[in-house]
Amino acid sequence: MYAHRSATASAPHTTVHWIGHLASLMGASLLTLVFCRSHERSHRETSRLRAISQAAQRVVLRPLPRRIADLRIGSVYRAADPLAEVGGDLYAVARTPNGTRFLIGDVKGKGIAALDGTAAVLGAFREAAHQHASLPELAAALEVSVRRHVAEAAQSDADAAERFITALLVEFPAGGCVMRSVSCGHPLPLFVRGNRVTALRGSRPAPPLGLAGVDPEAYRQDTFRYAPGDAFLLYTDGLAEARDGAGAFYSVTERDIAWRTAADPQVLLQQVQDDLLRHTQGRLNDDVALVAVHAADC
């Protein structure tokens, strides 16, 4: 009798325990389902954003040709935002009657927020590069275009007026083994000869575009001579200002890089990019744009 009553009394407790266990399993299954669906939506959204960013890059930051006349060209763009393919750093090239002209620059800000200024200055360069005989004239024309763009953008964006653009114009005229440059608050290229790299020194730069002058006389042109086989590395400040975990800056001129590979500019840039990412443990705080130009002949 006692045993029978004990078994009977434990039955409700067993049932409640079983129901609680089932409810826990159902709850865990539901949470897993919600997580999986959320993860799937997040993955789809990330893929969609990346596809949009890649399309924007192809339209705004067009791939540079691998060769123009006697110049071999390589380019790399690395965005700090892992979902972005284009942002505040920029580069372009134009083959004109006055020579092959390059632009590299950096819009204040980074990522998608700076894309409007990037598109504006690239569009202005692609047109004006063919219309002006000298780099100072070209720089002054870009200043006019940037000012116009900023004035229009400021009507709907209060921060537009603060988005100045550092820029470097570089020109390789046909023949003569000469490179000319005009800096608007932007570092001059690095010069590569054999397995050595040095930083070029030039005139005092003009202020960044948006803060500079509209008179060509406000811009100083530097001229550098080179020999066949030499190369130049154009870069944005994301390279010079990158840091490792301890806060040490990346100094590209002091790194162990096979500079002699500059005969293939894209190979050289891949080495620089890989070395940069090793230094920063794969993390960048700013976008980085690099253009390498190898002069096969004069």
Image (cartoon, rainbow, N blue to C red):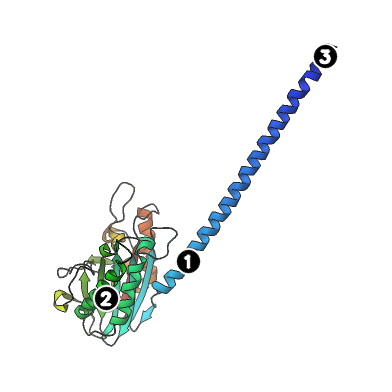
Q: Outermost residue toward the front?
A: 155
Say if residue 290 shows up in the picture.
no
Q: Please give the name of the residue rendered at 33% of the width and 74% of the height, measured from the top-left corner.
A: 122
Q: Please give the name of the residue rendered at 78% of the width and 18% of the height, measured from the top-left corner.
A: 9
Along the viewing direction, whichever of 45 and 90 lies nearer the viewer:
45
Q: Badge 1 is on which residue?
A: 52
Residue 160 located left or right of residue 140: right
Q: Quadrant of the C terminus?
A: bottom left
Three-letter amino acid code at disc 3?
A: Ala
Circle 1 Cα neighbour tier, 10 Å, few/some/many (<14 / 14–19 / ≥20): some
In the image, which is nearer the foreground, mark 2 or mark 3? 2
Circle 3 Cα neighbour tier, 10 Å, few/some/many (<14 / 14–19 / ≥20): few
> Alpha-carbon distance for marks 2 and 3?
96 Å
Residue 255, position as x, y percentages in the image: 30, 58
> Alpha-carbon distance for marks 1 and 2?
27 Å
Relative to 276, residue 35 above or below: above
Chain-order first, disc 2 or disc 3? 3
In terms of secondary structure, where does tag 1 sit? helix
What is the quadrant of residue 174 in the picture? Answer: bottom left
Residue 149, position as x, y percentages in the image: 29, 72
Count of labels in the image: 3
Three-letter amino acid code at disc 2?
A: Ser
Q: Badge 3 is on which residue?
A: 3
Residue 124, position as x, y percentages in the image: 30, 77
Residue 145 - label: 2
Q: Please give the name of the residue rendered at 27% of the width and 72% of the height, measured from the top-left corner.
A: 146
Chain-order first, disc 1 or disc 2? 1
Along the viewing direction, whichever of 86 and 154 lies nearer the viewer:
154
What is the quadrant of residue 275 in the picture? Answer: bottom left
Residue 201 located left or right of residue 38: left
Q: Outermost residue toward the top?
A: 2
Residue 154, position as x, y percentages in the image: 29, 66
